[in-house]
Image: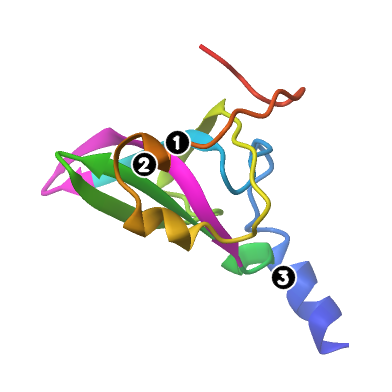
Amino acid sequence: MKTKLLDAVESKSLKKDIPVFEVGDTVEVRCRIVEGNKERVQVFGGTVIARKGRGINEMFTVRRVVGSEGVERIFPLNSPNIVEIRPIRSGKTRRAKLYFLRERTGKAVRLAQRHSKHTVIK
């Protein structure tokens, strides 16, 4: 009973235009940044290394390497601050969480590409 009630309330806040992407995919996340009274859109691109939660609480972690330093950012999937999620490349994985990529550097970070219908290649 309680779960049905919560799902009904949460369904109003869920985004409808979320693209299909999985762990291992390379994505560009465009998020809204407010600085003082100015607002801009910042692009954070990288590999999705984790997805967790469900419904309104679903989150995903994106990792990229900037200047030989790994940067990870956790995004709420249904946040109003996320303008767009754009899948770039689909990676072939056998795991649900790719935390082992944190220890890797250089070419070892790259995943083999999976060719499928939902991948958008520039």
- Asked if the residue under mark 3 is in contact with the one under mark 2, i.e. CB atoms within 8 Å, the reply is no
Which residue is identified by label 1? 110
Q: Is residue 1 above or below residue 12?
A: below
Going by the numbered disc 2, the residue's amino acid type is: Cys
In front of the other: 106 or 12: 106
- Asked if the residue under mark 1 is in contact with the one under mark 2, i.e. CB atoms within 8 Å, the reply is no
Residue at the location (75% across, 25% down)? 116
- Tell us which disc is closer to us: 1 or 3: 1
Label 2 SS: strand
Going by the numbered disc 1, the residue's amino acid type is: Arg
Asked if residue 35 lies in the magenta stretch, the reply is: yes
Which residue is identified by label 3? 9
Which residue is identified by label 2? 31
Q: Measure how far apart labels 1 and 3 are at the Cα level.
A: 40 Å
Q: Give percent across and percent down for residue 117.
A: 77, 22
Q: Earlier in the sequence, mark 2 or mark 3?
A: 3
96 relative position to 42: left or right: right
